[in-house]
Amino acid sequence: MADAKVIPFDDDRSRGAAGKGAGRRGRGARRKGEPGAVREVRPLQAPQPEPEAEPEPEERSEEPRRGGWDRKIAGGLAFLRRRITGDYDVDEFGYDEELTDQVLMSLLRPVAENYFRVEVKGIENIPAEGGALIVSNHSGTLPLDGLMMQVAVHDNHPSGRHLRLLAADLVFMLPVVNELARKAGHTLACAEDAQRLLEGGELVGVMPEGFKGVGKPFSERYKLQRFGRGGFVSTALRAGTPIVPCSIVGAEEIYPMVGNAKTLARLLGFPYFPITPTFPWLGPLGAVPLPTKWTIQFGEPIPTDGYPPEAAEDPMLMFNLTDQVREQIQHTLYKLLVQRRSVFF
């Protein structure tokens, strides 16, 4: 038997011949019967689309900006047309919702958000629908706290509800102020008007301290004055609506009242004439309020629908509920004052 010729595995000749054959056949090709050569497999890549050219920043923002201004101008012209032609609605109290939303709120909103930087807490305690009576402390020498509370309710409540404030008769005796107050939804602080509003499903705001609270000296700040005879409780009981206590911190310091010119107040027909560190010494500049930081907190509502109809005539019940509301507001004021680190920041 003839000896078989053995070719070593790493023989240079075999590698050279294989290399030449590979060069002739092309990479990856093989003869019939040869074992397949192991080669690197590269994953297929999908062709990447060419990135679209992004428009210049001016081109992206110009169209929305132009459309926004067009809508604002068109809305403003339509508003003026309705004002001139009288094609707008007011309710029986003189409340003009369109004017309040588009003009008055637009003027008050920057004051609340940027000047006093009002922080609102407990807005979920205000019902989403139906009547409710919001009872708040009153302070600040000028009644700006009521206006800020009105903005806070409208801008922070999920339903965007409007607050109808009960104002003193002096408000409706002043020229210009009288008309603006009516247009903004304010009405005279009497039980009949308040009950009609509550039974109509409105949010009604009342500050039982009245002039005693807004005109108290700076030394008595955040000390609640007497809440009257509890007429607001009687109104809520008759309407069967909840009472929502409200505490406002920050308003006491906008005009620190260090004195009261009583003689001048009587001559002018005002309940008081304030003297502050800046007014009347700086003239009109002294009437600018200090930019204090405000917090408005709405407490848990106190239900009244569980009482019988004759409960509104029970003086002891009215006294107890009035005292409960007052104590809850006072307690919240103390708590907010402890949490406050600065009057202005």
Image (cartoon, rainbow, N blue to C red):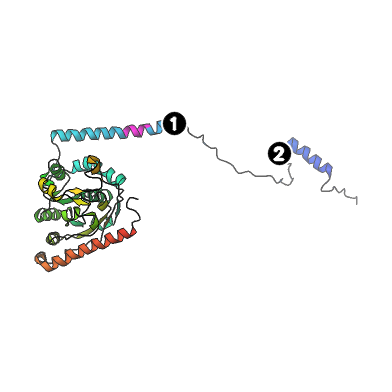
Tell me where residue 311 appears, x and y as whole percent: 11, 66
* Range of magenta residues: 62-67
Q: Residue at x 35, y 34 (%)?
A: 64
Q: Residues within 10 Å of mark 1 (few under 14, many from 20)?
A: few
Front in this rendered view, residue 215 or 45: 215
Q: Main secondary structure of the magenta part?
A: helix
Q: Which mark is residue 56?
A: 1
Q: Earlier in the sequence, mark 1 or mark 2?
A: 2
Kindly state the secondary structure of the residue where label 1 is placed: loop
Which of the two marks, 1 or 2, is nearer to us in this view?
A: 1
Tell me where residue 136 appears, x and y as whole percent: 21, 56
* 167 lies above or below 231: above
Query: Total of numbered circles in the picture?
Result: 2
Q: Quadrant of residue 178?
A: top left
Q: Find out whether residue 7 is within the magenta segment.
A: no
Task: Give, as a three-letter code, the residue at label 2.
Answer: Arg
Q: Is residue 334 left or right of residue 45?
A: left
Tell me where residue 230 appears, x and y as whole percent: 13, 62
Kindly state the secondary structure of the residue where label 2 is placed: loop
Task: Give, as a three-letter code, the residue at label 1.
Answer: Glu
Tell me where residue 258 appears, x and y as whole percent: 23, 52
Question: What is the C-alpha distance between the residues marked 1 and 2?
Answer: 49 Å
Q: Quadrant of residue 317?
A: bottom left
Q: Find out whether residue 64 is within the magenta segment.
A: yes
* 110 lies above or below 323: above
The residue pinned by badge 2 equals: 27
Q: Which mark is residue 213?
A: none
